[in-house]
Amino acid sequence: MPTSNSNRWAVLADVCTALNMLCGFLAILSAVRGALTRALWLAFLAAIFDGLDGKFARLAPAGKGTDFGLQLDSLSDVISFGVLPGVLSYEIFLKHMHVAGAVLGFMPVLCSALRLARFNVLSAKGSAQFYVGLPATMGTLTVCSFIWLDPLLPAPVGGLRLLPVVLAAVCLLMVSRLPYDKMPALTFHRGWTNTRNLLIFLFGLVFIPFFPRYVFFPLMMVYVVAGLVRGLRGPEGQGSRAKAEAELNEREKR
C-alpha cells in the first residue's frame, strides 16, 4: 500500500475500500441473523464507501489509484455487491425454493465476479465513456431498494414474490454489454448530462435516508432503464451501445 504524501489520496481510497468490505461483511452477518433493516442500511453504506474510494483514487497522481487498490476494490465489491445480495435474497425468500433458490442466490456472486473481472481487464487498457454492463454496486442497490419497496406492493405480487425476477434481471444486466453512466463528477461545469446525473445523485443522497421505501427503488429504476434505453432504443442510444461494444471488442482483441 502506498505511504508517501503524494499518494495520500490512494491511501484514503484503500481505507474506503476496506470500510466497504467491512460494511458488506456486517450486512451479511445481519442478514443471516434476520436483522433485515440493518443489512439494507449497511449495504447502502457500503455503496457510499465504494463511491468514495473511486473519487479518492481519481485524486491520486495520474488521476487513478494504484494497481493494488484496483484489485482490492474488486475483491471488496465481490463481497459487498456479490455475496451480500445473494445471501440476503436467500435468507429472506429464496431458501423456500430449495435447490432452485440456492442456484439463484449464487447468481449475483458469479455475475458480479464476471462483471468486475471484465472491468479490471478494460481498466488496464484505458478509460471508457460508459461502464459496460450494470455496475455490481447498482445491481445490489436495485435488489435492496426492491426489498424496501415490497411491503407497499399489492398482495398478489407482494411478499417478495417478485424478488427472484428482480435478482435474475439484475444478474443478466451485470453481464450484458449495455452502456451505463459512470458516477457523475462533483461539479456543475461538465455539461448537461453530468449536471442531470449529479442532481439525481444528490437528490437520492438526501432523501433515501428519510424515505427509502418510497424514493430508493424509483431512483434505481431511472438508472437501470436509462442504460436499457441508451443501449436498445433511439439513434443516440444505439450509437452509445455501438460505441461501448466497439470499445469492448477492440480491447478484447489486444
Image: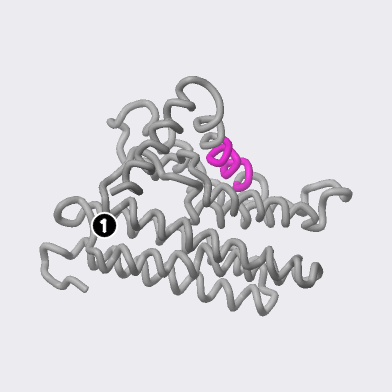
Question: At numbered mark 1, what does the secondary structure look like: helix, strand or loop?
Answer: helix
Residues 87 and 46: in front is: 87
Residue 166's place in the image compared with 12, above or below, is above
Q: Residue at x 50, y 56 (%)?
A: 136
Quarter of image, res 193: top left
Q: Residue at x 55, y 53 (%)?
A: 139
Horizontal side, residue 38 vs residue 11: left or right:
right
Horizontal side, residue 92 vs residue 140: left or right:
right
Residue found at the far right of this picture = 156
Residue corresponding to mark 1? 57
- The residue segment tinted magenta is 216-225
Q: Residues within 10 Å of mark 1 (few under 14, many from 20)?
A: many
Query: Percent position (x, y) of residue 157?
Result: 83, 49
Query: Percent position (x, y) of residue 240?
Result: 42, 30
Q: Which quadrant of the figure contains the N terminus?
A: bottom left
Residues 66 and 154: in front is: 66
**What secondary structure is the stretch in magenta mostly built from?**
helix
Residue 247's place in the image compared with 78, above or below, is above
Residue found at the far top of this picture = 235
Q: Residue at x 26, y 50 (%)?
A: 125
Q: Look at the image and say whether residue 183 sits in the magenta stretch.
A: no
Query: Percent position (x, y) of residue 243?
Result: 38, 32
Query: Percent position (x, y) of residue 40?
Result: 60, 63
Q: Look at the image and say whether residue 218 sits in the magenta stretch.
A: yes
